[in-house]
Image (spheres, rainbow, N blue to C red):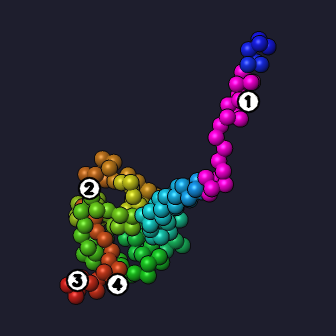
């Protein structure tokens, strides 16, 4: 066993000694490559942050608030449209209409494939169009105040219940976007 360890140690020592050593210039050249990797990681982080709107982050902070028919504050609880209205008013400063169908009428229709975090998703839960609304959070999920006895929560739009009742997606336009739409840009 000793005869095996000695040659192995010698080989390792020789390999370490024979390995090319980076001189000062090569070390400096390696740093931009490291900086490039850091830059790429930073870009990925920014992309993720950009996709997750402040609105969604704020809405997530209200998970667990109880449902209250007609409710529109954290103190009283929320119904679906009251929740959406409060999140937009608090985060964006945009006051949406009070009822879900009015919110649908006051926003821009988009295709489901165009959904971005912060967009509105509508469902027919009471045998009438646009009777329920939530905020899309990404990855096929939305946050909403579902019903009496429940709390604000995140759910999968692709679940059979929500899939069958999906009514459409809408985007809340900023004041700048609305001005462009009116002026024809």
Q: Which residue is mark 3?
A: 185
Q: Which residue is mark 4?
A: 175
Magenta stretch: dominant SS?
helix
Residue 13 is labelled as 1
| 143 horizontally vs 166: left or right | right
* Residue at the spot 35% in from the left edge and 67% down from the top edge: 119
Q: In whole angstroms, how far apart are the C-alphas of marks 2 and 1?
A: 70 Å
Answer whether labels 2 and 4 touch (C-beta < 8 Å): no
Residue 90 lies in the magenta stretch: no
Residue 165 is labelled as 2
Query: Is 49 above or below relative to 25?
Result: below
Between discs 2 and 4, the one toward the N terminus: 2
Instruction: State the SS at label 3.
Output: loop
Residue density around tag 1, few if under 14, some if 14–19, many if 20 or more, within 10 Å: few
Q: In whole angstroms, how far apart are the C-alphas of marks 1 and 4?
A: 70 Å
Between discs 3 and 1, the one toward the N terminus: 1
Instruction: State the SS at label 4.
Output: helix
Q: In whole angstroms, how far apart are the C-alphas of marks 2 and 3?
A: 34 Å
- Identify the magenta region: 8-28
Q: In whole angstroms, how far apart are the C-alphas of marks 2 and 4?
A: 31 Å
Q: Is residue 71 visible?
A: no
On-image quarter of the N terminus: top right
């Amino acid at each position: 066993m000793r005869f095996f360890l000695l040659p192995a140690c010698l080989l390792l020592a020789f390999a370490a000694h024979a390995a090319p050593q980076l001189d000062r210039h090569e070390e400096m050249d390696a740093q931009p490559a490291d900086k490039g990797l850091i830059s790429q990681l930073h870009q990925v982080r920014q992309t993720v942050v950009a996709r997750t709107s402040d609105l969604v982050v704020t809405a997530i902070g209200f998970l667990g608030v109880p449902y209250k028919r007609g409710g529109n504050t954290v103190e009283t609880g929320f119904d679906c449209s009251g929740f959406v209205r409060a999140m937009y008013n608090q985060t964006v400063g945009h006051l949406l209409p009070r009822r879900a169908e009015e919110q649908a009428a006051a926003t821009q229709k988009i295709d489901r494939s165009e959904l971005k975090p912060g967009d509105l998703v509508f469902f027919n839960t009471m045998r009438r169009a646009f009777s329920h609304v939530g905020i899309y959070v990404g990855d096929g999920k939305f946050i909403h105040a579902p019903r009496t006895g429940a709390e604000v929560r995140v759910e999968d739009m692709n679940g059979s219940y929500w899939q069958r009742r999906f009514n459409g997606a809408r985007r809340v336009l900023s004041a700048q976007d609305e001005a462009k739409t009116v002026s024809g840009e």
